[in-house]
């Protein structure tokens, strides 16, 4: 199913960048790091397509582009449909001998708005049809491009511009949609979660998603200092804490079989390593209001839902 | 080039569309079923299921994705086709603009049908008229034969490297889509030769390299970037320039097609019918023109100087041709099968009236809104319109500029 691709840090450093510097992402932007790392995972000719979102806007301001490989953006809600059309065209043009008989991979990128909310129909349809492509969700947990509005991927208690923490309401009332599980429920051959601090795991999973025949879904945690009101130097630390608190556990599901990835597995084996969510929340201004007597109980709620989801995941992985 | 031997088939309008697409060496069809175009998708999937085409058929989950997939397939270098109607076209609205903006020459059949609410599956032109500004070429067919011919021509028009414009071919819901007609069809190889293979104009990338305009890993380019106030306006202007060249291309393709098929529809842009000496004329588009022609024949046999101008191409609007065709007519009635609410008449009326403003003859121009939601266009209505025009000439007075016809008042 997967090649035996092995790489060292040096290999990755020496591999030419395909997502180039000069883009206009903010300081501390983890999504930009995610894109650069995923571009290191390519195995050959690749076409990239994007949903509307910060990384599309920041990387392709005409007449400039950060992309060294073919790139197309069309709209917000249709990244997976973009990929469907590209993949189908490549298939038929190859069949008719109009393009070289070589493998060309297709990767669709979308943010949380373009995936959890407005893009889920096109994504679900493309996966059901079995197109051979990798879909990467870079999840910065709100509509950051338009000014930090809540999405289906925004976590409970986070203050956004459309779920503001007020005197009565403590930020977003709803919980984060389990999007990767929804994709696994499509009987997708490969789905995984990844985070930029664990770059080796991220690159390995992106490569698997590219190599697998049929659709693959990669959910990447992507801290956004602007939207999360966090220090621009701490995005990678926040990414690590999300995994260590089990707010964002790392796993992969190959043909529906869940397995924990190393850093989350280590916590499963030694539960005392699991950190309280408070440590993760306190680094981010979007949760600042939770550290007041009035809303402090929300932290307990977040801890509770995190523990509950973690236990459910352990069960799926055959642990606990 | 000689006229090729053709085969007569009994086809309804939908089947004629599917048959034309089948013969046009289409690479990708992405479509979603929506009445009354569903038969197009059904027939085409049968061709795929029976191995009669090597097209990839993608049965998508929505019209929005149908057009998106066609758009990206076309930018990857494929010939792409889809079909829709009414609500489906409305759902595509956003991507209609993206398709023309990305200069993707997708061809789409639109089976014209009323928009909700109330929901109604029957014919009118509300769906395509509201999309007249989206940067697509619009051709309206009078019958199934013309529908077949127009789909084949559409590929050749849209893919012209000077244009790279998407094309929609409108056929009236049920009146054409579901009515069996004898359709002369060209041999497969003649159509394949006529449409040829896609050619890609060369463009300059951000790195200053000259590359074919498509997504190709060997010659990477970025399509669909963020384009702000410093360049967007010029790009929109380029689309309009392509629209400016389009009438010439449409005429040439139409002429070339006539040489192998023996069939023509005016000059491909407009079809004047007994207009040379006409004093009164109707302007309309779509299948209604068939009914109007019958009445014109009838009235002409009684010595009345009546005529018809059928608009075949509505976008780009053939301004020069329309002006020339109507400049000697004294009173014109424009029939609109759609309504621009609060806009003082329908879309075709607006166009014709503004064109005629520039003529020295300044004919009377009135508007009739008719046939919404599939209301039958009875020959009596056409008689009444010609009668009204006659009265305008006699009294030198317009009683009502915009009126509704064929409904309860």
Image (cartoon, coloured by chain):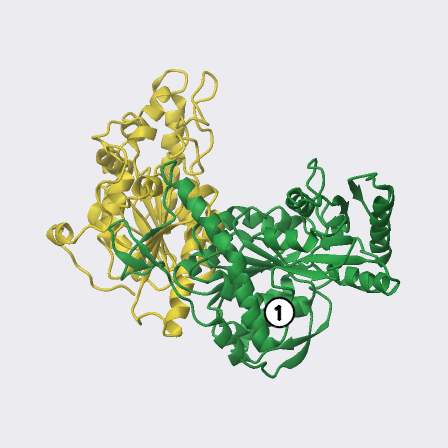
Q: Where is residue A82 in the image (x, y as percent from the top left)?
A: 42, 54
Q: Where is residue B122 in the image (x, y as percent from the top left)?
A: 73, 55
The residue indicated by pointer 1 is: B148
Q: Is residue B409 left or right of residue A284?
A: right
Q: Residue at x 22, y 40 (%)?
A: A22
Q: Residue at x 45, y 62 (%)?
A: B160
Q: Is residue B42 visible?
A: no
- In the displayed structure, B271 sits above or below A19; it is below
What is the residue that sits farthest to the right in this orientation?
B302
Query: Which of the two residues, A296 or B79, is positioned nearer the viewer here?
Result: B79
Q: In this view, does B302 lie to the left or right of A218?
A: right
What is the residue that sits farthest to the left in this orientation?
A10
Q: Position of residue A112 (x, y in %)?
A: 40, 41
Instruction: Bin the neighbour count of mark 1 within 10 Å (Cα to Cα): few under 14, some 14-19, many 20 and up.
Output: many
Q: Which chain carries label 1?
A: B
Query: Which of the two residues, B105 or A107, is positioned nearer the viewer here?
Result: B105
Query: Where, by quadrant of the figure, is residue A285 drawn?
Result: top left
Q: Which color is chain A depicted in?
A: yellow
Indicate the chain coloured green by its letter. Answer: B
- In the displayed structure, A200 sits above or below B170; it is above
What is the residue that sits farthest to the front in this orientation?
B360
The quadrant of the image that shows the N terminus of chain A is bottom left
Query: Which of the two residues, A15 or B142, is positioned nearer the viewer here?
Result: B142
Give the structural element (helix, strand or loop) at label 1: helix
Q: Is residue B325 left or right of residue B255?
A: right
Query: Which of the two residues, B176 or B83, is positioned nearer the viewer here?
Result: B176
């Amino acid at each position: 199913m997967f090649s035996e691709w092995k790489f060292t840090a040096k290999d990755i450093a020496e591999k030419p960048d395909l997502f180039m510097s000069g883009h206009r992402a903010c300081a501390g932007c983890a999504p930009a790091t995610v894109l650069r790392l995923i571009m290191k995972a390519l195995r050959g000719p690749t076409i990239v397509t994007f949903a509307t979102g910060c990384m599309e806007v920041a990387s392709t301001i005409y007449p400039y582009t950060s992309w060294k490989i073919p790139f197309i953006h069309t709209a917000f809600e249709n990244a997976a449909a973009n990929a469907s059309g590209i993949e189908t065209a490549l298939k038929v043009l190859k069949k008719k001998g109009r393009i070289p008989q070589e493998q060309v991979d297709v990767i669709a990128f979308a943010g949380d708005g373009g995936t959890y909310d407005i893009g889920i129909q096109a994504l679900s349809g493309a996966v059901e049809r079995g197109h051979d492509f990798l879909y990467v969700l870079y999840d910065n947990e709100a509509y950051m491009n338009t000014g930090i509005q809540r999405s289906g991927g925004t976590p409970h208690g986070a203050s956004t511009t459309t779920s503001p923490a007020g005197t009565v309401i403590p930020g977003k009332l709803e919980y984060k949609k389990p999007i990767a599980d929804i994709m696994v429920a499509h009987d997708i051959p490969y789905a995984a979660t990844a985070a930029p601090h664990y770059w080796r795991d991220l690159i390995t999973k992106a490569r698997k998603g590219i190599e697998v025949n049929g659709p693959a879904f990669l959910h990447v945690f992507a801290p956004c200092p602007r939207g999360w009101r966090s220090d621009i130097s701490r995005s990678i630390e926040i990414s690590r804490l999300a995994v260590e608190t089990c707010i964002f556990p790392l796993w992969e599901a190959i043909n529906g079989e869940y397995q924990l990835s190393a850093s989350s597995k280590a916590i499963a084996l030694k539960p005392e390593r699991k950190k309280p969510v408070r440590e993760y929340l306190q680094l981010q201004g979007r949760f600042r209001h939770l550290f007041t007597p009035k809303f402090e109980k929300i932290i307990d709620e977040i801890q509770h839902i995190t523990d509950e989801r973690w236990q459910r995941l352990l069960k799926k992985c055959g642990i606990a | 080039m000689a006229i090729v031997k053709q085969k007569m088939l009994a086809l309804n309008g939908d089947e004629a569309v599917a048959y034309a697409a089948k013969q046009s060496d289409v690479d990708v069809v992405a479509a979603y079923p929506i009445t009354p175009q569903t038969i197009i998708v059904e027939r085409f999937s049968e061709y795929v299921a029976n191995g009669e085409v090597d097209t990839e058929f993608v049965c998508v989950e929505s019209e929005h994705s149908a057009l998106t997939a066609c758009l990206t397939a076309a930018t990857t270098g494929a010939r792409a086709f889809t079909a829709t109607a009414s609500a489906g076209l409305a759902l595509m609205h956003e991507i209609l603009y993206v398709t023309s903006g990305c200069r993707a020459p997708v061809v789409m059949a639109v089976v014209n049908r009323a928009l909700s609410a109330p929901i109604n599956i029957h014919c009118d032109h509300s769906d395509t008229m509201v999309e007249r500004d989206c940067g697509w070429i619009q051709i309206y067919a009078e019958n199934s034969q013309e529908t077949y011919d127009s789909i084949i021509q559409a590929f050749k028009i849209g893919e012209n490297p000077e244009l790279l414009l998407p094309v929609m071919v409108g056929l009236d819901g049920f009146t054409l889509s579901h009515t069996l007609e004898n359709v002369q069809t060209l041999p497969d190889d003649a159509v394949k030769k006529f449409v040829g293979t896609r050619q890609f104009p060369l463009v300059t990338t951000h790195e200053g390299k000259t590359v074919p305009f498509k997504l190709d890993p060997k010659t990477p380019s970025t399509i669909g970037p963020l384009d702000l106030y410093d360049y967007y306006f010029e790009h929109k202007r380029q689309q309009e320039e392509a629209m400016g060249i389009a009438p010439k291309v449409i005429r040439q393709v139409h002429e070339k097609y006539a040489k192998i098929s023996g069939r023509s529809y005016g000059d491909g842009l407009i079809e004047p019918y007994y207009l040379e000496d006409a004093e009164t004329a109707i302007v309309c588009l779509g299948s209604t023109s068939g009914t109007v022609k019958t009445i014109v024949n009838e009235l002409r046999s009684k010595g009345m100087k009546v005529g018809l101008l059928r608009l075949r191409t509505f976008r780009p609007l053939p301004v020069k041709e329309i002006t020339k065709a109507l400049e000697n007519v004294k009173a014109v009635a424009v029939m609109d099968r759609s309504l621009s609410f609060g806009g003082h008449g329908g879309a075709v009326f607006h166009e014709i009236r503004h064109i005629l403003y520039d003529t020295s003859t300044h004919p009377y121009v009135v508007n009739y809104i008719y046939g919404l939601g599939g209301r039958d266009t009875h020959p009596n209505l056409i008689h009444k319109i010609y009668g009204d025009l006659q009265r305008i000439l006699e009294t030198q007075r317009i009683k009502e500029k915009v009126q509704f016809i064929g409904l309860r008042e």
